[in-house]
Image (cartoon, rainbow, N blue to C red):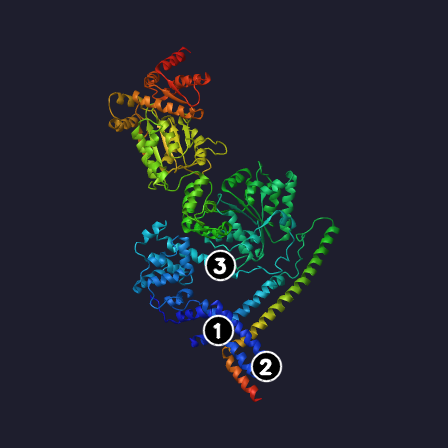
Amino acid sequence: MVADFFLWWYGAGWRRAGLAVLVRARGVLDTFSVGLLARTLFSPFRQIDAGGVRGPMSVQLQAWFGRVFSRFFGAGLRTVMIFCGLVGAGLSSLFGLVWLVLWPLLPVLPLVGVVAWLIGANA
Amino acid sequence: MNGFDYHAPRARQARLGKLLGAGWFQYVALLSAVLLALLSTVLLLDNQMIGWIVVGLAGPLLALVVWGQYLRHLPRGRTDDIADILDPAMLARLPKDPSPQDIARVVMSQAGGKFFASRFMLGRDFLTQIAGTDPAGSAAIWSRALTMRNETGELTSGAVAAALVLETENVDQYLAHVGIDSSDMPRGVLWLQHIEDLIKAHATRKKNAGGIGRDWAFGFTPLLERLGHNLSDQVAAGAIARKLEAREQIVDQMMQILAQSGRRNVTLVGQLGSGKTKLVHMLAERLLDPDASVPRGLAYNQVIALDPSMLISRAQGRGQLEDMVLRLCGEALSAKNIILFLDDAHLFFEEGNGSVDLSTALSPFLDGGALKIVLAVDEQRWTQIVQRNGSLAQYLNRVIVAPANEQETQQVMENQIILLEHQYKTLYTYQALKAAYELSGRYIADQVMPGRALNLLESAAHNTDNGLVTRGSVERALEQTRGVKVSTANTQDERDTLLNLEDKIHERMINQTHAVRAVSDALRRARAGVRNPTRPIGTFLFLGPTGVGKTELAKSIASVYFGDEQSIVRLDLNEYVRSEDVARLIADPAQDSHSLTAQVSQRPFSVVLLDEIEKAHPEVLTTLLQVLDEGILRDINNREVSFRDCVIIATSNAGAERIIQHIQAGEALEQFEQQFIDEMISSGAFRPEFLNRFDEITLFRPLDQGELKQVIDLIISGINKTLAPQKLTVHVDEDAKLRLVEAGYDARLGARPMRRIVQRTVENIIADHVLQQTALPGSTISISLAEVDAALARSSAK
């Protein structure tokens, strides 16, 4: 049974833990719609007349300016959101990596503790 | 290996997982690890090196927590041995060399056993009671269970429960008690698997599909939000539905059309109940959680349903409606992520009560291709649209939605009852689902599958048996909503009525014992569940002179069997003497509510009386042949109308003179019956193929004077019932009755003049007594021969 545990812990278990880190990071990116926002970075932002406006030149010009503003406003907001998503995914990955580094140590942590105690006591 | 190996590594791990994965262990170990970590921090801050040892202890505890979580949900092993594929929760609980009873005990503690106990009504102790105690019997159970493994090759507790049942001796006898058979058990395994898959899918479902910025590139839709129903939001909040292969293909087709560059409209054409609206929900679900098969332009699109009848009722006049619809379409077009859905779309393509023809206004949107729109219409309406406006039909991309087959309907019901159970706080049994499919297919003709089965299931939720929706609940729901009797006779009163049908009928009918027995036998067969369900309950041809009780017998059946004398659909076929009259027979109920199909649709459980059948045109008779044969008649709209719960009685006077001659020659009916029928065929009165369609051809003989006196008794008894509220009774002397028979007797008209003669004499005498106040409440009016004679003289003088 002990062998079963160590086999799993340093084999399939570690792989699963690595996969879980990736899934979590991807989940953060999805929550912030990072892929979707990057694809539509310069699309107009939620405006009702996105389909085009008919009328005199002044109205069309006004609509054009409106769309340009909407695009820039949207790009700014999307950039902020993409940044937040990337930071969130980065932090999640970082914590995940720490966990993955600690992973092999957990079962043998008592030994590590004893060694550290001996070193500390003799220091 | 075809047995259970207690010492297999996966079995050992499962047993350990039962301990390490238990909630209490996880909680205690995690809490201890955290406390140890905190304690070590305090110690180390205090420069006490023992803190390193303390923190070291937390590591293995944490590792055990993680391993325990894994062990609790052990994946299947590499081999096909029982220990490598069995559900880990079961594996952890099985003893060494388990007997069938040990397996049953473990199964009953798991989802599989509980599922079959409740959904199949097998009861909690059923498996443990039927399972044997000899471990040698387990091999057969494992072997049977292996044939019901799931798609990933795992052996679930449901498969083992089903195997335990199927490996029981006399299994069919056991299962018959609860109204199922062996072939239903594997279906149950699939149903349980489906429920477990739904639970897993629900747990892993993304809460916010597409993320925070999903809709930022699309326009606002304030008007659509106000006047439409967002199906995508509904789907996101609801349960995940099972993928039905045939339906998914239609959804793929819809997505292809909606993503193409041309006319991006889909017109779903299918009969009522075929699941057109459900398909749109499925489309909304696919778009919310897009996989590789969803075109990029459709991912995360919102499906918004518009209710044409609501829009029509909101608008004040045609102009406002047109304006409103154009604004809605314009908004959907501008927003770019909207798919409009118009259910009952025909309401926008025809002028009429509650509908407005907006085809001219909508054509640019439908033809232009920019607007993504799904329309749903039923087949009949589609035909009308094509006939009326061919150019509009050309713009529309038609997708046919066929009725669901049995397997699909079963799956749709399994999906839907999750919502119904939540809504009505009840539990549906497998038997209820089976009955809903079977009975709705037979009795609900105005819809197709799966809609008709689902509607019946929902109605059944109001007729539960101790919180369970059973076959009985479905039968009662059908009886209440459709006025049919589908359950077998189960009350003592009902059984008594059926066993004594002849006596009940003779309470209102004199003699004709042969005919009465033939009809009674057919009705008893029907209610005992031994009749052919694909034909009418009984088909009879009554032959005989006028006034011998043919119509009276039909009325008696309606009253005694169908519970009401009004449960009779009567057609005088002397009004159907031309070939064109066939159309009147099967006319649209909306245009002619007196057509045969319309009346039987309204009263599917009744006596159909076809009077004077010999006078009908041969084409009318040919149309009726189908009814006699299959119990089905298609109306002018090609909708099936079922006659399978009707008693069909055709009457005819053809050959009445011959019957009278035979009887007057002193012959009994049985002696000349066959000869008479042969004469009818050879004389051309009836075609042999028509006569052969009837279950029974029954001859009625003329009534003699003694029987006519009994008819008088029945009529007087009827008068007494009428007088009962006035607390009056009438008594007619025997010689007076004989006088009435004598006065009313006419060999050609049988008993028919008797009612008239009683009316002219007895009823007139009573009326005089009442008006002269010589008959007071509580008294009996006695009528003598002299009074009858006087009344007869008075009536003939008039």
* Residue A78, position as x, y percentages in the image: 66, 62
Which residue sits furthest top? Answer: B797
Mark 3 element type:
helix
Residue A122 makes an appearance in the image: yes
**Are callouts 3 and 1 both on one chain?**
yes
Please give the label number shown on residue B64.
1
Kind of residue indicated by mark 3: Ile
- Seen from the viewer's position, the closer of residues B624 and B765 is B765
Name the mark nearer the viewer: 3 or 1.
Answer: 1
Name the mark nearer the viewer: 1 or 2.
Answer: 2
Vertical side of B120 occupied by B784: above or below: above
User: Which chain is indicated by disc 1?
Assistant: B
Mark 1 element type:
helix
Alpha-carbon span between mark 1 and mark 2: 25 Å
Left of B533 or right of it: where is A82? right
Which residue is tagged 3?
B199
